[in-house]
């Protein structure tokens, strides 16, 4: 008999709750003979599974503390008001609602797993009218588990980054940057600062020369050139942007012709590049750096945005600890060619939390989600398949990633693109590529509502300029 989801109250409150927490269960899934598929996360991989899965063949439970899908390519534009935050946030219940009644969503965080009993420990917010910070702990069973919890920012242990820097990984990060930029502009325009302090305050340093850091620098340049120049012309002339990258070049995954083109655009736009430079320490007002020749330097700053890398989230480490002999990578969960977590039966992983030969990109996670949904559908349709779902070798082809190319906005209504063409690739950059980038974003957004919202944001910005107002 197939295993049905078990949801019950935990008997050990001391190990699963905080001092002011409580324990309860959720209503069990129906005993209808369907397998229970639990999806952890609401990112690119898991939402793609939701859209492609034959949900009528499973009891599907989506678990995530984030109740929306975030269209991350436009996250940098939210920091400066080019795009509004809600335009790129698709409520997960909208996605679930379009798929039917066999999918449930639980706004909770998975904190532990019992692989022997096939149970997950979830923590969710307590009674909204109860004590602040109270949590409730729930156990829920699974037959198949897909881990798509993503990753978080990586400071590499650099002193001061956590305390003084801002990050750009989630919508909350973009909102903090937007608030900080607004506060910086207002403080600088007050007129009571020395020249040295004003120059420091209006110096934004971006650490990390990948697509996120480059796109944020480009968006910030547009804010200064197009809007701050109108609001407070004197400040715009003193505003500085510096991009720091430890590697010899920015955008290491792009063709060198696009890298050089981006560098020329940045130079023209007044964005300073410090490549081959690593950050050693961050203080409240200065950044201490080391060059390739081991020389140390100190640079004053007003705002630091850190986008220098990612690391696994806590649940990935928790799952790793259950099979330490097999899961030996601290970067995340090691998976095989079928996306199975090595050492764990009936558990798959995809996206940034998974360690494989593929790069941690949104399009990789999306393709993994589509492949995994197809695999589940084929196995569920085959009534002759009696083997456990994790024994799928030979029944379906292993996952193979096919690159769709790469795009990045670099500011000044310019973008770069590296697109596959037969056995080679073409590289283009400029204003036309920016139009292509915008069209791609509108096409890839998760719903018509999101596409219309983003298009409206762009139209309002073109007609009336940006707004830095923050709720």
Image (cartoon, rainbow, N blue to C red):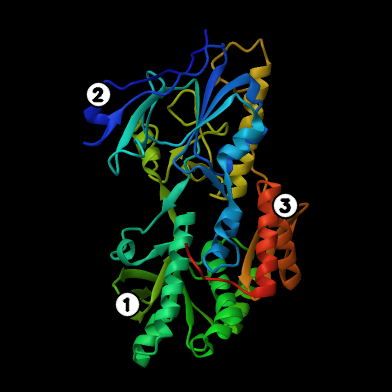
15 or 334, which lies in front? 15
* Picture mark count: 3
Label 3 residue SS: helix
Q: Do the residues labelled 1 and 3 touch (CB within 8 Å)?
A: no
The numbered mark, 1 or 2, whose residue comes first in the sequence reads 2
Give the number of the mark in front: 1 or 2: 2
Distance of mark 2 from mark 3, alpha carbons? 48 Å
Q: Name the residue under label 1.
A: 286
Q: Is residue 65 above or below residue 425?
A: above
Q: Residues within 10 Å of mark 2 (few under 14, many from 20)?
A: few
Q: Name the residue under label 3.
A: 443
Q: In this view, does 412 lie above or below 100?
A: below
Image check: 274 left or right of 258?
left
Q: Quadrant of residue 26?
A: top left
Label 1 residue SS: strand
Q: Mark 2 points at which residue?
A: 12
Q: List x then y, in percent, for residue 137.
A: 33, 30
Image check: 332 left or right of 13?
right
Q: Would you say residue 413 is visible in this rendering?
A: no
Q: Residues within 10 Å of mark 3 (few under 14, many from 20)?
A: few
Q: How crowded is mark 1: few (under 14 residues within 10 Å), some or many (20 or more)?
A: some
Q: Is residue 68 above or below residue 153?
A: above
Q: List x then y, in percent, for residue 95.
A: 62, 38
């Amino acid at each position: 008999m197939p295993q049905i989801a078990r949801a019950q109250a935990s008997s050990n409150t001391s190990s699963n709750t905080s001092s002011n927490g409580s324990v309860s269960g959720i209503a069990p899934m129906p005993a209808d003979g369907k397998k229970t598929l639990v999806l952890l996360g609401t990112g690119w991989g898991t939402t793609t599974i939701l859209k492609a899965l034959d949900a009528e063949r499973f009891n599907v439970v989506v678990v995530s503390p984030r109740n929306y899908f975030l269209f991350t390519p436009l996250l940098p534009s939210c920091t400066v008001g080019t795009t509004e935050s809600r335009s790129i946030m698709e409520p997960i219940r909208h996605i679930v609602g379009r798929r039917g009644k066999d999918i449930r969503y639980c706004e909770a965080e998975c904190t532990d797993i019992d692989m022997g009993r096939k149970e997950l420990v979830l923590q969710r917010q307590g009674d909204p009218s109860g004590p602040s910070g109270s949590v409730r702990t729930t156990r829920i069973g699974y037959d198949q588990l897909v881990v798509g919890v993503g990753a978080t920012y990586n400071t590499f242990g650099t002193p001061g980054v956590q305390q003084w820097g801002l990050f750009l990984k989630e919508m909350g990060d973009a909102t903090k940057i937007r608030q900080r930029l607004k506060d910086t502009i207002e403080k600088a325009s007050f007129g009571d600062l020395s020249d040295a302090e004003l120059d420091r305050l209006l110096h934004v340093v971006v650490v990390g020369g990948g697509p996120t850091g480059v796109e944020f620098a480009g968006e910030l340049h547009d804010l200064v050139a197009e809007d701050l120049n109108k609001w407070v012309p004197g400040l715009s002339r003193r505003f500085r942007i510096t991009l720091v990258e430890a590697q010899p070049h920015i955008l290491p995954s792009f063709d060198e012709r696009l890298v050089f083109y981006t560098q020329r655009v940045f130079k023209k736009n007044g964005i300073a590049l410090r490549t081959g430079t690593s950050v050693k320490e961050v203080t409240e007002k200065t950044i201490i750096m080391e060059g390739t020749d081991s020389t140390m330097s100190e640079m004053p700053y007003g705002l630091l945005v850190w986008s220098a890398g990612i690391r696994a989230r806590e649940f990935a480490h928790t799952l790793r600890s259950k099979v330490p002999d097999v899961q030996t990578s601290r970067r995340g969960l090691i998976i095989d060619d079928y996306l199975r977590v090595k050492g764990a039966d009936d558990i798959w992983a995809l996206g940034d939390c998974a360690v494989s030969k593929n790069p941690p990109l949104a399009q990789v996670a999306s393709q993994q989600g589509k492949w995994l949904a197809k695999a589940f559908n084929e196995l569920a349709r085959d009534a002759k398949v009696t083997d456990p779902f994790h024994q799928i070798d030979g029944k379906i082809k292993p996952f193979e990633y096919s690159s769709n190319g790469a795009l990045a906005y670099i500011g000044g209504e310019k973008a770069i693109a590296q697109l596959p063409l037969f056995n080679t690739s073409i590289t283009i950059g400029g204003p036309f590529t920016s139009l292509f980038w915008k069209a791609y974003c509108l096409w890839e957004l998760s719903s018509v509502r999101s596409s219309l919202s983003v298009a409206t944001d762009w139209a309002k910005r073109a007609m009336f300029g940006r707004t830095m107002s923050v709720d």
